[in-house]
Image (cartoon, rainbow, N blue to C red):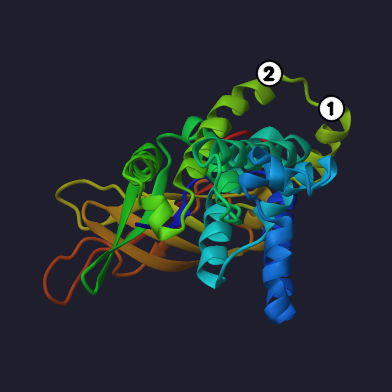
Amino acid sequence: MIPIRDIVPSRTYPLVNNLLIGTNVVLFFFQLSLGSEAEQLIYQWALIPARYTVDGIASHFSLSAQISALFSYMFLHGGFLHLLSNVWFLYIFGDNVEDHLGHGRYLFFYLFCGCASGVVHILFNWHSTIPVIGASGAVAGVMGAYFLLHPNARILTLIPIIIIPVFVHIPAFVFLGIWFVFQFLSAAGGHGQAAGVAFWAHLGGFAAGMAMLPFLRALPQARIEGRLQKATAKNSSPRFQVVRPEGLPESPDLFATLVLTPAEAARGAQKTINAAWGFHNRIFKVNIPPGSKDGTLVRLHGAGRRIDETNSGDLYIRIAVRSPARAGMW
């Protein structure tokens, strides 16, 4: 299963999440630029359990080097697909967690989950000399937090059936639950060691994210954090929105609601919508004329229910104007 996007847009720009994604990408290309010397970099900055548990190896590293490896390993990757999978999952789920925690607490949360997943990996691979790298544990922590924050959010998911791509909306608790069960079965079955995947680290990060979220939510928000969130607040609705058309059974016409900010309604906007009803999922581009009001209808000719082989009803998009300051407006 490959997540394409969720339907819970954030109210603020994910500055920290984008910074983390950019840092992972830049460091990966730095690794590539080193050529044959990249292996030395990995052994120096990767997480190697034996560095902490075997006296003859641990004596070669200072305390600062041991602590820094718990952080540095999560910013290195073993290949392009490894990097892509991590930053993509972080892009899908991270913005909403950052939006909820705030920028500063989210950065602490991400680093904590990465460290916690590293510690769990050490506990389950006590004397291993195999270096572990990647942001998977930290990203798993973000997924654990998302699981608690938005369990009923819909995840647009690509499920390849042989050579046929199938797109379905899956509740977040189902998608993340399946992911967690797969990680656990792979870890318990010992497949991680054979495949070179630190499944126990993934599970540790996920659990750390679920455990740390309530603690951070209980902490009072710093004044500077409030200012940052205000400065990064979005003044536009998502460019892509999922709408649920409805209509009378005897009518071929359908009606759906599209949310805009007052600024977008005044100046006009272009949105992409996924109109999902029954077993139908269709993508449309909608041009909102300037000067639209709350309740304005935009007609999409022929986008409604099929009447016969050549004719279809219309889809009417009802504009809902909402202030971005209202939590959960989307």
Q: Residues within 10 Å of mark 2 (few under 14, many from 20)?
A: few
- The residue shown at (76%, 44%) is 66
Which numbered dot is residue 218? 2
Helix, strand or loop at mark 2: helix
Where residue 39 appears, x then y in whole percent? 67, 70
Label 1 sits on what residue type?
A: Ala
At label 1, counting other C-alpha atoms closer than 10 Å, the crowd grade (few under 14, some 14-19, many 20 or more) is: few
**Image location of residue 130, percent across then percent down:** 56, 55
Label number found at residue 328? none
**Quarter of the image that includes the C terminus:** top right
86 relative position to 62: left or right: left
Q: Position of residue 58 (x, y in %)?
A: 73, 44
Q: Above or below — where is 35 with respect to 172?
A: below
Specify the quadrant of the image occupied by residue 219: top right
**Of 284 and 163, which appears nearest the observer?**
163
Q: Which residue is mark 1?
A: 222
Q: Residue at x 49, y 30 (%)?
A: 148
Find numbered disc 1 in the image and state the secondary structure of the residue it sits on.
loop
User: Does residue 321 appear in the picture of this structure?
Assistant: no
Left or right: where 68 falls relative to 119 = right
Q: Residue at x 14, y 65 (%)?
A: 307
- Residue at position x 61%, y 63% from top? 77
Q: Position of residue 96 (x, y in %)?
A: 59, 43
